[in-house]
Amino acid sequence: MITTKIIEASGGKREAHTIITIDDPTLTYEQQLAGILMQYEEVKSSLGERMRPVFRRWFLSDAVNQQPLLPDDGECATSIVEQPPLSLTKVALWVWMIEDAVVAQAEDGRFAVEAFGHTHIFEGGCRRPGMDPYHAMLFMLTSTQEALSERGGSLLDSCVRTWLFVQNVDVDYAEVVKGRNQAFQALGLTPSTRFIASTGIGGRQADRTALVAMDSYSVLGLKEGSMRQINAPDHLNPTYEYGVAFERATSVDYDDRRHLFISGTASIDNKGQIVWPGDIRRQTLRMWENVGSLLAAADCGWEDVGQILVYLRDPADYVVVKGMFEERFSGIPYVILQAPVCRPGWLVEMECMAMRKI
């Protein structure tokens, strides 16, 4: 099944988010992958050759066996994570596309995308196999800082969004946070400057010695004030109050559009406490309320949302959450994945990206 949201800015370039899933769980992985790839080509054909993929993520149910069969075409930055689609299928795909984007891979493996008058740097699947989570996180962020510095940027001035995939999030997340906090402090990201929008979530790699992996997205040469922290203090407190360092959301303004990246958001209040422990329906509603407050704080609405990723700790909650999302968000590309959230009491978490004309 293909769900695509096309977004147009006044007089500017189109963007599209597409999520492709498979309806028949009885098919083999090879058959499901072939179906995804066929639909992907259909989407690209329908949108026209000017629409270029700039980032994509494969969601797999068994990365060790499935990843070797994925296409390695160098088309754009690609993330691969074992987060099983909860439709009981084996593979799903999210793709972000931008009209007339110029995409090129650098020698360090990162991708540079020219769009909206800026260079966008995408990094997919950064990892340090064999390294403990604390040092892996520290080294990955330092590596990203060095790569941005070589291009005239920095984590502080350029990095908009990260995704952290932790193989055993219940055990290792605290060490990941410790490594991130140390890297940020050394590189000038503090409560008085800014942090980075992020999702820290359970997710495995084909290489089981990679205990944590990271994707990142940065924009070079932004004008002062064009990248902003987005907060909703009536609903959510700053994350540093409970020892972690990421922004609830980050917006980036270009000449004709605003991008909004909402971090992984769960059923939490503005004291950092879990709301509605053990109740998946009420946690989902509170999660939506929190995300809605962040959208409003950036002068956006649900109609501006281009894609949603939903994470469930317990697969038994899928039927309930699927029904709720289908009733409310059937027109927005979304996929529901099995991925433990960083705090065990959170049963559901979501992230999203929005764009509106300015």
Image (cartoon, rainbow, N blue to C red):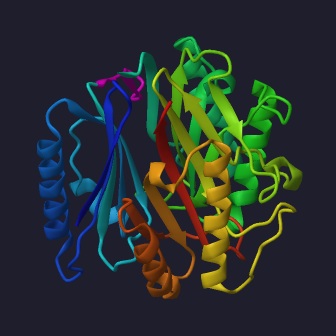
Q: Determine if the magenta segment contains residue 303.
A: no
Q: Position of residue 302 (x, y in %)?
A: 51, 56
Residue toward you, 130 or 16: 16
- Which stretch appears magenta? 101-113
Q: Residue at x 82, y 33 (%)?
A: 190
Q: Residue at x 50, y 88 (%)?
A: 316
Q: Position of residue 217 (x, y in %)?
A: 51, 34
Tell me, yes or no, if residue 130 can be seen here. Answer: no
Residue toward you, 332 or 2: 332
Q: Position of residue 280 (x, y in %)?
A: 61, 83
Residue toward you, 263 or 230: 230
Q: Is residue 193 left or right of residue 136?
A: right
Q: Is residue 315 above or below residue 124?
A: below
Q: Position of residue 247 (x, y in %)?
A: 71, 44
Q: Residue at x 60, y 24 (%)?
A: 158
Q: Is residue 129 above or below residue 192?
A: below
